[in-house]
Amino acid sequence: FLSIFSFLDYKSIQHSHKMLIEKRKGNINNSIKHGLLAIKYGRNVDNTGTPIKFNLGVLEYQKGDIIRSKNYFEEALKVHPYHIGILENLMIINAKNNNYTEANKLIDLLNKLFPYYYSPIIKLIKIHLQKGNINEAKTLMETTNFEHATPIVVKSLNSLRKYINLISH
């Protein structure tokens, strides 16, 4: 039995590696094919511990299939419930689909798990601005503690503030 499991493990790792290579090359369909084969051989994470379904979610999002993408992210969350990329991508999908209740729950969870990781907050501010929700963007900027922000985050925030001031007047 050990040799069978070793073979299955090897094939899964091989296909998850090919999935990432094809993803880097921009061959989305081939990447998805290898990701599905990696799962078929019994592994649900790649050799870095990242859920394979997370990568499949990213690929489906790039293809424009938001429903399939969201389903993959939700399945990946079962494997790794605190994966920063899964949580952030689910927040983006929910916010872009006007499901702000769920997006805000994910932002709250991300803030608890990663208090100095500001990327999801900045992305949510941008989504609010794209959708014309200026007051929500302002509120999010005002209620978030950016005390530990890096210079890059501060620069981004300053640009967003300037944009808000420009469109508010």
Image: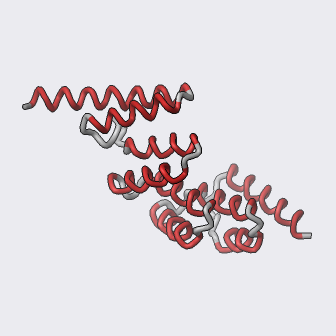
Image location of residue 152, percent across then percent down: 69, 49
Relative to 20, is 151 above or below? below
Q: With 41 as the anchor, is 105 left or right in this view? A: right
Image quadrant of residue 94?
A: bottom right
Image quadrant of residue 100?
A: bottom right
Which residue appears at 64% of the width and 53% of the height? 150
142 vs 151, nearest the viewer: 142
Relative to 53, is 40 above or below? above
161 vs 68, nearest the viewer: 68
Which residue appears at 61% of the width and 62% of the height? 97
147 vs 44, nearest the viewer: 44
Image quadrant where one finds the N terminus: top left
Image location of residue 117, percent across then percent down: 55, 57
Q: With 94 as the anchor, is 113 left or right in this view? A: left
Image quadrant where one finds the C terminus: bottom right
Which residue appears at 28% of the width and 36% of the height? 40
